[in-house]
Amino acid sequence: MRLVLIAALVAAGASAAWAQTEPAKEQSRMYFNVIDYGAQAGGEADCTAAVQAALDAAGKAGGIVQVPGGRYLVKGHLSIPDNVTLEGTWRAPARSIGAGSALLAVEGAGSPDGEPFITLHTNSTLRGIAVFYPEQANENPPKPYPWCVRGIGDDCSIINVLLVNPYQAVDFGTYPAGRHYINGLYSQALYRGLFIDKCFDVGRVENVHFWPFWMIDGDSPARRFTLEQGEAFVIGRTDWEYVTNCFCIAYKVGFHFVALGDGPGNVVLTQSGSDVGPTAVLVDAVQGHAGVAFNNSQFMAGIVVRETNPGPVKFANCGFWPVNDTARMADLRGGGHVTFSSCHFAGWDRKRDGEPAIYADCDGLTVSACDLMDEGKRQITLGPNLRAGIIMGNRFRGGEKVTNNSPGEVQMGLNAGR
């Protein structure tokens, strides 16, 4: 009887030991280090094959490919398989490649439509990595390169990544990439920053910062190119996009809402902004039933809604101020209704040509609880295509100066400012 009991205890102990060691063993198989596959830090040896071999090994069962601190020259391009993470040492987006994990990209100069440097697939992630283009030129125009990162498939993620100087940063729109997640993306994208389209399920974008991490001099040729032609955020079809804490500076267009083959999208943006650019928000089209809404955001300078727009565009608790040649703060057209609520406007009509802060020739306009801060300037002009206007409860400093050319119904009242 005693022997039976001892045998049972031994078996139980062995079972317990297996239960403790086997998960650890399985867990160890989830990590793959690029050094073990032949990658060499230092920025001289081509590590394309080594990094891709580690990714392919991880792709057999899903796993994490680790890139230790250092600079790794990648002369080709990389494909991150389904359920795989390519991970470096950064735990927050960096301002320079520094001592962290950096990939040096050189392929594709002169071919903006070529193969992206990194392609994410379903449920794959790029995390804690910096990418630098050592052969990019401070010229106007700079060297065109393919997209730095592209998503193909749902649930692609980018977390705590620095893309120092890509010509085009992140493409989540050429192919469907629904339920994407971006948190902590810093970049000086020279031509295009983030492109979203074909998102047929909710996408989330947080803490994106498009800023001159590579070429800070505002008079440099590359910076001039971005101000003349660059667009930071280009958003097409997305069925609910949540955008939070996203910023750009010195782009021709900050936020551009477009309608391509799959139609327009609807977006909610909070605590975001576009600085030092002629057009902070450009709306070609948004979904007619949902539209786009900015909350607690700031803009320098103008808002343009084109004739092609059918849907609502809304701004709440937002601030607007000028660049040197700002005329109108908002130029509004199309078939949608535009709303400004609890916003403030300062510095329009820089050339003193009599331009209003808001020119509205769209289907409808609401301006309520706003502060138009420049005394003696025209605040609002209503155009001949406006069918409905509500202008109530605002502060018009220097007195109300509103021109109404609308044949539609316009309600005005309770405005103060003399």
Image (cartoon, rainbow, N blue to C red):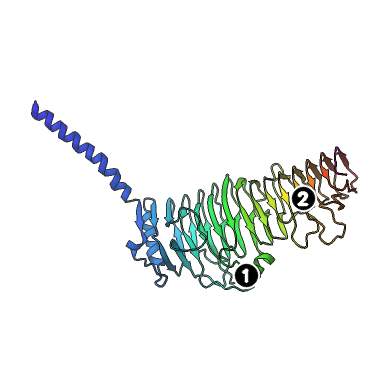
How busy is the neighbourhood of tag 2: few (under 14 within 10 Å), some, or many (20 plus)? many
Mark 1 touches mark 2? (CB < 8 Å): no
Quarter residue 411 falls in: top right
Whether residue 276 sits left or right of residue 393 in the image: it is left
Residue under pointer 1:
222
Residue drawn at the location 71% of the way across and 51% of the way down: 285
Residue drawn at the location 87% of the way across and 57% of the way down: 354
Residue drawn at the location 89% of the way across and 48% of the way down: 401
x%, y% of residue 259? 68, 53
**Which label number is shown at residue 345?**
2
x%, y% of residue 349? 82, 58
Towards the viewer: 318 or 122: 318
Towards the viewer: 52 or 138: 138
Asked if residue 416 is among those painted magenta in the image, a careful observer would answer: yes
x%, y% of residue 120? 48, 56
Amino acid at the residue labelled 1: Ala
Whether residue 118 sits left or right of residue 197 in the image: it is left
What distance separates the C-alpha of mark 1 from that of mark 2?
31 Å
Whether residue 91 sits left or right of residue 364 in the image: it is left
How busy is the neighbourhood of tag 1: few (under 14 within 10 Å), some, or many (20 plus)? many
**Which label number is shown at residue 200?**
none
- The stretch of residues the image draws in magenta is 413-417
Per the picture, the main secondary structure of the magenta-coloured stretch is: loop
